[in-house]
Structure formats: structure tokens, C-alpha cells
Image: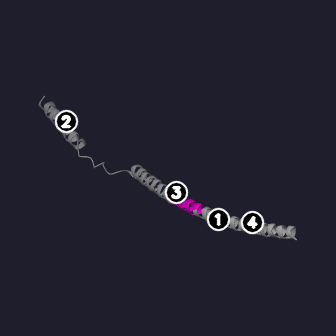
Amino acid sequence: MKASKNLMALCAAGMMVVALAACQKKEDVSAPGPAEQAGQKIDAAAAQANSDIKDAAAKADAAVSQAASETGAKIDQVTADANKKMNEAADAVGQKVEKAGEKIQDAAHK
């Protein structure tokens, strides 16, 4: 009986040692694994791409606005030049009509 009690005590002590060994502190798992690192890199790349797209869109919008402004100014200038030439042509035609009218009057007086 004494031997079986000693054997039981020894088994109990062995189980305690095994249980304590199993309770050993595990390594810190807060460090990201390879999949998590890849996911973080993908997220960072997507965020950078989004930022780049927004910057490119803003630059394109500014360029289109500038081009529209320049085109509008050129159209205004062309319109002003055409209006000026039309007025000059109308004046020239008016002077020729006056001269023709004077010639008709001179011919009628003769």
C-alpha cells in the first residue's frame, strides 16, 4: 500500500510538472504574420493609389479649367476682331454707296 501511495504521489507530481510545462508563456503573437503583412502592404498601396488618383484628377480639372478659360478668351478676341472687320467692311461699302450716289446725282444734274 505504501508503494502504491508513493507511486500515486509520484504520478501526481509528474502530472503537475507536465501541467506547469504546458502553461509555459507562449511567444508574443502580436507581431503580424506574413498574410497580415501582405494585407497591410496591399492596403497601403491602395491608399497611395487612391491619393495619386485624386491628385491626378485635381490636376486634370485645373488643366481643363485653364484650357477652357484660355479658349474662352481666344473666342472673345476672335469675335471682337471679326466684329471690327465687319464694321470696317460696312463702312467701306457705305462710302462706296455714297460715292455711287454722288455720281448718280452728278449724272442726273448734267
Q: Which residue is mark 3?
A: 61
Q: Nearer the viewer, residue 59 or 44?
A: 59
Magenta span of residues? 61-72
Secondary element at tag 4: helix
- Of residues 51 and 9, which is closer to you in this image? 51
- Marks 3 and 1 in Cβ contact (< 8 Å): no
What mark, if any, has residue 11 been given in the picture?
2
Is residue 63 depicted above or below 103 in this figure? above
| Label 2 vs label 4, nearer the camera | 4
| Tag 1–tag 4 contact (CB < 8 Å) | no
24 left or right of 1 in image: right
Q: Amino acid at mark 4?
A: Gly
Return the x and y of residue 2 as percentages of the image width and height: 11, 31
Q: Counting residues from the N terminus, which is met first, the one under dot 2 or under dot 1?
A: 2
CA–CA distance in space, label 3 to label 1: 25 Å
The secondary structure that most of the magenta stretch takes on is helix
Label 2, label 1: how far apart the Cα atoms are: 105 Å
Q: Residue furthest top?
A: 1
For marks 2 and 3, give the one nearer the viewer: 3
Residue that label 4 marks: 94
Mark 3 burial class by Cα count in 10 Å: few <14, some 14-19, many 20+: few
Q: Quadrant of residue 106?
A: bottom right
Q: Which residue is mark 1?
A: 78
Q: Nearer the viewer, mark 1 or mark 4?
A: 4
Mark pair 2, 3: CA separation:
80 Å
